[in-house]
Image (tube, rainbow, N blue to C red):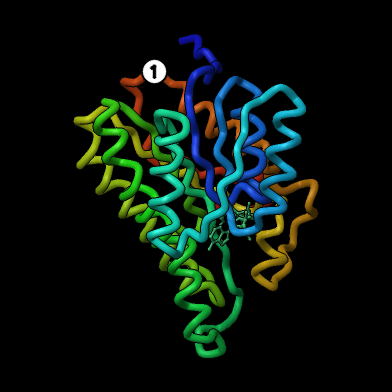
């Protein structure tokens, strides 16, 4: 089966596009003709990336939003449909961890992790699905983690949120597949991004040996360019330097 990697005429909203995986997905999708709507909290980073994509001949707009705030997520999705006429793909990628024992974790750090990793995914899907039902098709890609199936000390809240992303996504798929909407979960292990720095931890693998953000971008592109009959449920991606247990 030859898969055509052409997203000409498609519109994708990508959360967490100000760095790492989200930025790489945006660049890859734009390179194959997709109009990309870049979202995250840091407007300046989004503007810089949008500018770089446009300079390379792509189509990109920056729309800042905090995914923990439903009103902002709804505005992001509705204004995209208002401006672009459609939303074909939503990549719910924003997320962060705070690497600490639970008893040292502040209640607001618990809320923020549930907010960015889980609520943001639920909010994004809630806002996008009605548009996709009206269009008769759509593609939701939610970024989980190996923490969607493995458990680790110092990450209890993050693991809880990423486990929940999997359950949420699989349940939602059963609601929306009749409308031509697919829901994929990409679950990476260590990726060479700012994630570990934000979490306040160090990973034992050299940065160059970890998955690269471009690996996730290529996998997301693979998922959205498969024929409409193909639903990819969950993909786990590991760098070969990291044990899979
Ligand atoms: N790197 C890894 O090893 C790894 C492994 C498994 C899963 N993941 C997951 O991959 C996803 C992307 O992370 P990354 O590795 O690319 O790390 P990253 O470079 O730190 O990117 C995280 C992105 O999320 C955005 N973000 C965080 N909180 C947000 C909020 N409340 N509202 C809107 N945007 C928010 C950040 O933008 P702003 O700060 O500008 O808002 C940033 O663009 C996350 O869901 C992460 O959990 C990463």
For the view shown, which residue lies furthest in the bottom direction?
103
Instruction: Say whether residue 192 is visible.
Output: yes
Looking at the image, residue 39 sits to the left or right of residue 212; the answer is: left
Say above or below: 125 vs 27. below
Q: Residue furthest top?
A: 2
Q: Is 113 located above or below residue 106 in the figure?
A: above
Q: Tell me the quadrant of ligand 1.
A: bottom right
Q: Left of 138 or right of it: where is 136?
A: left
Position of residue 35 measured from the top left corner of the image (x, y, whole percent): 55, 28
Q: Which residue is rendered at x = 47% and y = 59% of the image?
A: 67
Q: Is residue 176 above or below residue 58?
A: below
Tell me if 156 is positioned left or right of 48 in this view: left
Position in image of residue 122 (x %, y %): 35, 55
Observer-nearest residue: 156 or 35? 35
Q: How many marks?
A: 1
Q: Which structural element holds mark 1?
A: loop
Is residue 170 or residue 11 the one in the foreground? 11
Tag 1 residue: 227
Is there any visible trace of residue 149 in the rendered image?
Answer: no
């Amino acid at each position: 089966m030859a898969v055509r990697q052409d997203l000409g005429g498609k519109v994708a909203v990508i959360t967490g596009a100000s760095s790492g995986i989200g930025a790489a997905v945006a660049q890859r999708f734009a390179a194959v003709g997709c109009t990309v709507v870049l979202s995250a909290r840091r407007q300046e980073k989004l503007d810089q990336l949008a500018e770089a994509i446009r300079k390379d001949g792509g189509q990109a707009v920056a729309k800042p939003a905090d995914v923990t705030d439903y009103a902002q997520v709804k505005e992001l999705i509705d204004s995209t449909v208002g401006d672009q006429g459609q939303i074909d793909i939503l990549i719910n990628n924003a997320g962060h961890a705070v690497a600490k024992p639970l008893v040292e974790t502040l209640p607001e750090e618990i809320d923020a992790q549930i907010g960015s990793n889980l609520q943001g995914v639920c909010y994004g899907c809630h806002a996008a699905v009605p548009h996709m039902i009206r269009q008769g098709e759509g593609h939701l890609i939610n970024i989980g983690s190996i923490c969607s199936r493995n458990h680790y000390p110092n990450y209890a809240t993050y693991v809880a949120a990423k486990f929940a992303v999997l359950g949420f996504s699989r349940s939602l798929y059963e609601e929306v597949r009749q409308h031509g909407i697919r829901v994929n979960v990409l679950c990476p292990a260590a990726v060479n991004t700012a994630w570990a720095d934000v979490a306040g931890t160090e990973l034992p693998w050299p940065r160059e040996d970890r998955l690269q953000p471009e690996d996730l971008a290529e996998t997301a592109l693979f998922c959205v360019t498969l024929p409409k009959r193909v639903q990819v449920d969950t993909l786990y991606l590991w760098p070969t330097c990291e044990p899979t247990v």
